[in-house]
């Protein structure tokens, strides 16, 4: 009989999967400062098509529709991911305060995320880059 073993520390497998060729996504990942109590969070470029990318696409997440956050075994996609990151981010610098002011509100996150996604699509087109491929 096979059994699945959960990691001893679910926080050890926390990651944010984003599009490394999107200038907005990359800048966001560089600028977000997470509180130390969140634990380690690996920033993973989806363009590298690593294990996190395969896991995300096998679960049916379309990464062209938004970043994917895996936190303590739970997934947050698109506007949910940016909302959770805002709740967990530090407000010690101007970006943290601005990010928190906008995205700590679940309603604002849901309302504004489609604009961010459109901006990403437009930026990729203008830069001559393709959208992420689904497996």
Image (cartoon, rainbow, N blue to C red):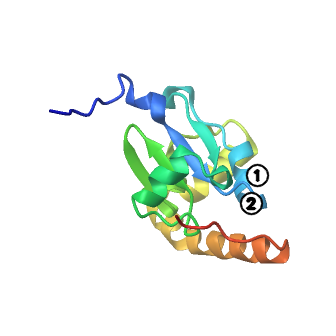
Residue 11 location (% of width, % of height): 44, 30
**Callouts 1 and 2 close, C-beta under 8 Å:** yes
From the image, tell me which residue sits under label 1: 27
Tell me which residue sits at (67%, 57%) in the image. Answer: 19
Where does the image place residue 2, in percent across and percent down from the top left? 20, 33
Residue 40: mark in rendering:
none
Foreground residue among 129 and 84? 129
Q: Residue at x 78, y 72 (%)?
A: 123
Q: What percent of the width, then of the height, locates residue 131?
A: 67, 70
* As drawn, 93 above or below 118: above
Residue lying furthest top in this view?
Answer: 8
- Helix, strand or loop at label 1? It is helix
Identify which residue, 28 or 64, lies in the foreground. 64
Left or right: where does residue 132 sit relative to residue 26?
Answer: left
Under circle 2, the secondary element is: helix
Q: For this view, does 8 lie left or right of residue 71?
A: left
- Residue carrying label 2: 24
Which residue is farthest right?
127
* Marks 1 and 2, how far apart at CA: 5 Å
Badge 1 density bin: few <14, some 14–19, many ≥20, Cα 10 Å:
few
Looking at the image, residue 69 sits to the left or right of residue 131; the answer is left
């Amino acid at each position: 009989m096979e059994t699945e073993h959960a990691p001893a520390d679910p926080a050890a497998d926390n990651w944010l999967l984003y599009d490394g060729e999107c200038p907005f996504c990359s800048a966001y990942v560089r600028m977000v400062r997470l509180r130390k109590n969140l634990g380690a969070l690996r920033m993973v470029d989806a363009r590298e098509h690593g294990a996190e990318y395969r896991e995300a696409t096998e679960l049916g997440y379309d990464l062209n529709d938004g970043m994917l956050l895996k936190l303590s075994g739970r997934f947050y996609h698109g506007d949910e991911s940016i909302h959770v990151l805002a709740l967990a981010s530090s407000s010690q610098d101007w970006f943290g305060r601005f990010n928190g002011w906008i995205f700590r509100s679940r309603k604002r996150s849901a309302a504004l995320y489609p604009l961010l996604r459109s901006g990403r699509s437009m930026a990729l087109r203008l830069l001559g880059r393709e959208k992420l491929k689904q497996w």
